Amino acid sequence: MDTLVTVGIILAIVLIAAGFVLFGPARTKRRTPSAHVPDLTEDTAEVEEERRYETPTEPTTRLARLRARLAKSNNVFGRGLLTLLSQDTLDEQTWEDVEDALIMADLGVDTTAELVDSLRERVRVLGTRDPEHLRPLLREELIKVVDPTMDRTLNVAGSEAAREAGDPAVMLVVGVNGAGKTTTVGKIARVLVAEDRRVVLGAADTFRAAAAEQLTTWGDRVGVETVRGEEGADPASVAYAAVEQGKRDGADVVVIDTAGRLQNKRDLMDELGKVKRVATRPLGEGHDVDEVLLVLDATTGQNGMQQAKVFAESVDITGIVLTKLDGTAKGGIVVAVQRALGVPVKLIGLGEGADDLAPFTAEGFVDALLES
């Protein structure tokens, strides 16, 4: 009897256990405590941010690349002049051909006369037609007219007082539509980012459709913020807001794009002066615009000279950016515009690529022209 009771009890326990397993609460999969699960969200965001932004080419690297491209082009300064100067007979006709070649390159009549007179005297004294002897002579004379004494550095460091006040340097970029002004502003941002500078862009060209969008796209590619307003907004107010934002963010440089001004529109030129006056009001007392760059299309030749003179009347130009210099038949515009305005060419562009803008040097420019 006791045995039966014992067996009954065991069976009851087994049935109860089986029922709990079959009909009891579902078992859950054991999880690792959250404290032990690494949070990769932040790292992933950093990787995505890193991948989203482009890395601009170092200025020295792009200068070497542009020089190589310039050297490969068909130019009158280099091979053409050396061919003329190395002829057996350097008569008046030959020297006239040299003058014509230089004038056709937009060097300017007065500058051409100076260069040819100096070359004639040195060739006469040297008494040789050997291109190997003439090359260094020609190089010296060309560098002299391009003027290596001009300061071609971009003024983006600002004054000591401005740095102590936490003020960014302010750069204004001006030029007519079609010269590549907005694109140049985007490329300048890339140059500055490559130098590890913090940049804010100001889209003060509020009259041209899609100008602000174009500039924003350039800025987004390298992680630079663009301050913009509504289409048709007051350009000076946008410039003001950009500088204000740059100071608030601790930026090193604020680069402001302006509308393409028609030189026969006096009211527009006056407005450019207003932008220059208003832009730096968020900054410390006496802080003016640090750099005013004029963008010129090198292929426009003497027409570009007229544009440059009109802009110089409205705002103090501190430097020139020459775009589309891959057509070296207009290479003499470098000298002509410098002499007309008394300010240096600081940047040159030879192509449409994002990093096809580089610092200009007199020696590098002439060496590229003389390379065969």
Image: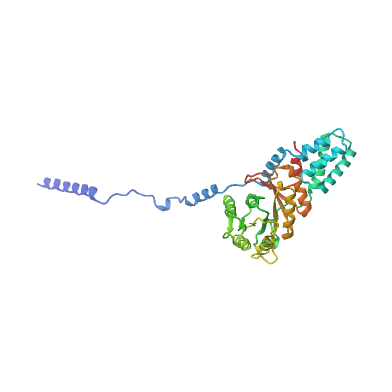
Residue 368 relative to residue 48: left or right: right
Residue 101 relative to residue 127: left or right: left
Q: Is residue 261 above or below residue 360?
A: below
Which residue is located at x 67 percent, y 65 percent? 284
Percent x, y of residue 62: 67, 44
Percent x, y of residue 27: 29, 49
Q: By what rule are the colours in the image chosen?
A: rainbow
In the image, 327 versus 189, the foreground residue is 327
Position of the C terminus by quadrant: top right
Residue placed farthest to the right in the image?
125
In the image, 345 versus 165, the foreground residue is 345
In the image, 316 versus 108, the foreground residue is 108
Percent x, y of residue 19: 21, 48
Residue placed farthest to the left in the image?
1
Residue 362 relative to residue 92: left or right: left
Percent x, y of residue 238: 61, 61
Q: Which image quadrant is residue 201 in?
A: bottom right
Q: Is residue 125 above or below residue 231?
A: above
Q: Would you say residue 364 is visible in this rendering?
A: no
